[in-house]
Image (tube, coloured by chain):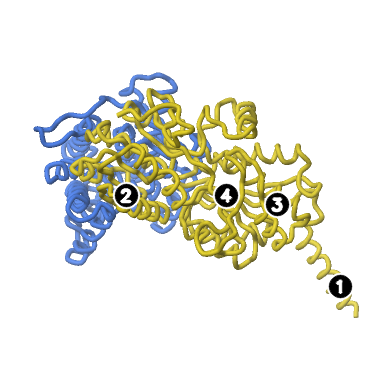
Chain colours: A blue, B yellow
Amino acid sequence: MFAIASMNGLVIGVIYALTALGVSLVVGIMNVVNFAHGEFYILAGYFSFLFANALGMPIIAAMGLAVALVFVFGLLVEYTLIRPTYGDDMYSLILTFILSIVLQNAYLFIFGPYPNKPPGWIKGATNIFDLFFYGNQRMAALVAGIAVIVVVFAMIKLTWFGRIIRAASQDRGMAELNGVNTTRLNMLSFGLGCALAAAAGVILAPVFPVTPTAGVPVALTAFVVVVLGGMGSMWGCIIGGLILGLVENLGAAYLSTGYKHVFGFVILIMVLAIRPSGLFGRKEA
Amino acid sequence: MRRICCFLVLAFAIACMATGPAWASDTIKVGVVGPRTGGAAATGKAFEEGIQLATDYVNANGGVLGKKIEIVFEDTAGAPDKAASGFERLATRDKVVMVLGESHSSAALAEIEVANRLKVPFMVVEAWADPITAKNYRYVFRAGPSNSGVVKSTIAQWVAAEKFKKVAIVAENTDWGLGIAELCKTALDAAGVENQSLVTERKSQDHYMELTKIKSFDPDAVLAFVYGTGLHYFVAQAGEVGLTPKAVILDGAGPPSLWPDFWPNVGDYGNLECFVSSMHEKVELTPLATEFRKSYVKAFGKNPTDYKSRSMFDAILIAADAINRAGSVDAEKLVDALEKTELTVTRGTARFGTEKGGPEYHHWMPPMLVIQWQDKEQVVLFPAEGATGKLKR
């Protein structure tokens, strides 16, 4: 039981971390909480389903196109909805909340209420050291999730764009004085955050088919991970996601399956009671 | 004096507007409550299909009290607070003479309180929790399955007929899931069948830990009371962890196993899955069931799958019959007429229990089948008299 709970905790934890990275990026740079994050995740799932199933595209191409389209959609949302609200966090929060409801209803209208699943990359399950069977698609999602996280970290740490992101998230005013166009940076960051949600969506849709309202728990979990790890901290997302995944699965294995998600909230409350800024969050000046 | 006259004219006009829709229009309004949005929006779609066919059928056969029947559909999203306010809107704003529908027990339990308070007849269609009719409210009826009815007349008997020795029960944490799981446990304990019970979260996508626990119990059968997309996740993941096909899964609700995306979502793991249903593609209990299928194919270009479309069809026919026999839209007369219902619909002859004291009061329990997917063909396993094949393992 411990082995499969740990393995599943690891897989679910990486998935949580991946979905939370986009939220963390947008919060860290723009101080905008994107309530529609889960709906961008779902949109990418629908796109990959549509391109692969209806248009017959190869699944990798369908996934890539889905992420690209969600990135463009994210840029448009930033330009039309978020940009006019800079300076008042509450407006952007309300706007993204409304956007999430609008998108949910649009998905229901366009795709219907039934779950949609893009084709899996790999079928069946593997016997892991004669201990348990584990779904191949989940293991593939784990590998793909880790790959995306590594690419994002490499981009943040090693590229010029990543350096600008780090500079703006540390001191926006100073970054502007050094010639950083923060308006354009906001737009690209929001698009990138949406693209990360989309990457999670296309990786996970073959495991968890998408429905119009399936983005709500995705976004909720992402917010929990971001708060647990510390607002705006990328490493916090990874550690927070893994802690949440492991706690939920070990709690379900040894305590009760009926309160799996409650264990995560208990951990969140405990951490916040000791470190209100989260595990890796910076204290407010 | 002039002011008083103006006030009286205005008051009269408002009174006419308020009472107008019930009498002045050439339709009689019946309300429907159900989830058009949320996780079980597929049920709302099935209800809409049943409404379309039933209104066409009723209006083509003389309507109600010489007028056309008109359905007003209020979305409840499966949430008790929305359900209660939606019901109240139907009764007070739309002035419906009766309300039908619902498929979430939690929502129905909120709605029956409003129905009882406002004295509006309410016929529950697909919400199974026993307390809905066990509260013995005068204005509350149920023309569909109940937890105790399904367990007693179908699930417990099927488990006995198949001679299962070890059975696992897994239920979502809702009024329906927890209620039916408890009744199953009681029935299995009484029959001496070794069993294990687990609770899962309604909105959970990942069931690996539940399935691992069940696998270590090594059951012959798993009674799964998980509704909606969760059932698809459960069946697919049961195959991945190697629980099936050694153990047989029974979907204790039914419709999710018949949704158009069942096979794409579960793949080969769906083969040999069993489910409870009041409808089978080849078993039709009454001539009206055949007529319903033909009308459905004509209207929607496909065969009916989700049996809740037919449940709604039946409910509207029962409501129309009661209104016609009552000869009035008075709530008391409608309740009296409903209590005397004896109408053959698609699932048999509807008759409501009138003896108080249990969930059978104001309840008509239609017959249910246990069906197994065998190479994507539906094979009826239970009851024996309707069986079209045997259980495959």
Would residue A110 appear left or right of A259 to someone viewing this image? right
Residue furthest to the bottom in view is B1
Dot 3 amino acid type? Ala
Query: Which of label 2 and label 4 is nearer to you?
Result: 2
Question: Residue at image x 26%, y 38%?
Answer: B220
Q: Are marks 4 and 1 in contact (CB under 8 Å)?
A: no
Instruction: Tell me which chain the residue with mark 2 is part of.
Output: B
Residue B169 in sight here: yes
Query: Is B269 placed above or below A255 here?
Result: above
Q: In the image, residue B164 lies at what x, y percent?
A: 29, 40
Question: How far is disc 1 from disc 2 in space, using C-alphas?
Answer: 75 Å
* Secondary structure category for the residue under label 4: strand
Question: How far is disc 2 from disc 3 in space, using C-alphas?
Answer: 40 Å
Mark 1 — residue? B6
Mark 2 — residue? B191
Picture quadrant where residue B205 is located = top left
Q: Are marks 3 and 1 on the same chain?
A: yes
Crowding around mark 3 (Cα neighbors within 10 Å: few <14, some 14 to 19, many 20+) is many
Query: Is B358 placed above or below B42 here?
Result: below
User: Of label 2 and label 3, which has the lower sequence position?
Assistant: 2
Residue toward you, A24 or A221 = A221
Question: How far is disc 4 from disc 3 in space, using C-alphas?
Answer: 13 Å
Q: Quadrant of the N terminus of chain A?
A: top left
Mark 3 — residue? B322
Question: How far is disc 4 from disc 1 in space, using C-alphas?
Answer: 49 Å
Mark 4 — residue? B143
